[in-house]
Image (cartoon, rainbow, N blue to C red):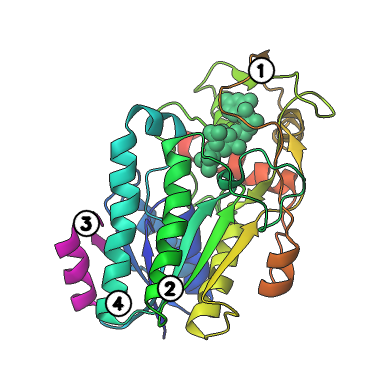
Amino acid sequence: MKQILVTGGTGYIGSHTAVELQNAGYEVVIVDNLSNSSLEVLDGIEKITGIRPAFEQFDLIEKDKVNQFFTKYPNIEAIIHFAASKAVGESVEKPLLYYRNNLVSLINLLEAMDQFNVSGIVFSSSCTVYGQPESLPVTEQAPILKANSPYGNTKQICEEIIQDTLVANPKLKAIALRYFNPVGAHPTALIGELPLGVPQNLVPFITQTAAGVRQQLSVFGSDYNTPDGTAIRDYIHVVDLAKAHVVAVSRLVEEKSKKQFEVFNLGTGNGLTVLDVVSSFEKVSGQKLNYKIVDRRPGDVEKVYADTTFANEELGWKAESSLDDILASAWKWEKKIRGIK
Ligand code: UD1
């Protein structure tokens, strides 16, 4: 059985990917420092798949520990690297923390790959690298614009670090996956997103408002150049996203990559407004959501959604879930963690 290291594997996207990897017959080893997740996630993964993944708790910025890890697990065939700090606002307050965590952990992994003969890495990137694209849907060829947060900048710099490393080391291969807006939870509601404190992202804020944890959703801006004036994003079910990682890592371990470095957009291709999300949520939950329109949020782009042609054709993968399914899964998860019937 091929063994895959999943860094950040107890986190939101990492845990859903661990499930899909195990369902596809891979052996998963998770590394996580539990800075934004908990050990109970392993129980959820085990309940869904019947298999408890191996787990090591340490911080990837500690080089000695990274090297000890690969000495202990000499059969790792590829890495999926999720572990990173990801809060846009916090990255503005604490830029050096973001640069240290996100860049140093990647550098330590790339050095270890060379030393311990691991040839492939899948990297979690973001559509934030495109900023506000000039033309939509956005393809992988669109120019990378100056990042508007240190978090976004770490994604750009990490993609560059990977590319430079591959030039110097022809044995290595990498795939960067640029996520649009991952939302939803596993349909079993055994794993899902667990935001710390006040959620910054739309869907957890909606489900927490409906659950009575937040009083009211603020819709940021209604004067955008869109059909209803609210901003447009491409919301993708986290399970669809997880499945794309299985395809990407198989491409690496089965040596099917066409180039040493490949980049794929992971979205649905559908652009939806904030109010589309609100009304879909109201439909699937059967309850009205308390929201008000407020000013735009600084740093937000007006609209972004993916051209998914390359991922669909090259990976043979396509996002399948509808927005209603996605929000139903998010609501089921929120109700479960709040003990709502
Ligand atoms: C944000 C980050 C992005 C990151 C992603 C995943 C920015 C500019 N971008 O994407 O880099 O990869 O999260 O963590 O922060 N909205 C509301 N009310 C809310 C929350 C959100 O109206 O309470 C709106 C936003 O203005 C936006 C949409 O909902 O139009 C989606 O917001 P969000 O879920 O935060 O994702 P992004 O901002 O697209």
- Name the residue tied to disc 2: 167
Q: Secondary structure at mark 3?
A: loop
Q: Which residue sits furthest right? A: 227
Asked whether residue 15 is in view, the answer is no
Which numbered circle lies on residue 202? none
Position of residue 159 in the picture relative to residue 90 (left or right):
right
Tags 3 and 1 in contact by the CB under 8 Å rule? Answer: no
Q: Are marks 4 and 2 in contact (CB under 8 Å)?
A: no
- Secondary structure type for disc 2: helix
Q: Amino acid at mark 1?
A: Tyr
Residue at which label 1 appears? 291
Percent across and percent down for residue 276 are 77, 33
> What are the residue bounds of the magenta stretch?
56-73
Q: Assess disc 4: are there few (<14), some (14-19) or many (≥20) residues with their C-alpha within 10 Å of its C-alpha.
A: some
Residue 141 visible, this orientation: yes
Q: Is residue 62 magenta?
A: yes
Which residue is label 3 attached to? Answer: 58
Query: Label 1: how many residues lie within 10 Å, few (<14), some (14-19) or many (20+)?
Result: some
Q: Residue at x 19, y 76 (%)?
A: 72
C-alpha span from label 1 to label 4:
51 Å
Amino acid at circle 4: Asp
**Disc 4 from disc 2: Cα separation:** 13 Å
Pick whichever of labels 4 and 2 is earlier in the sequence. Answer: 4
Looking at this view, is 113 or 291 the one in front? 113
Which quadrant holds residue 274?
A: top right
Rendering coords of residue 291 (x, y %): 66, 17
Q: SS at mark 4? A: helix
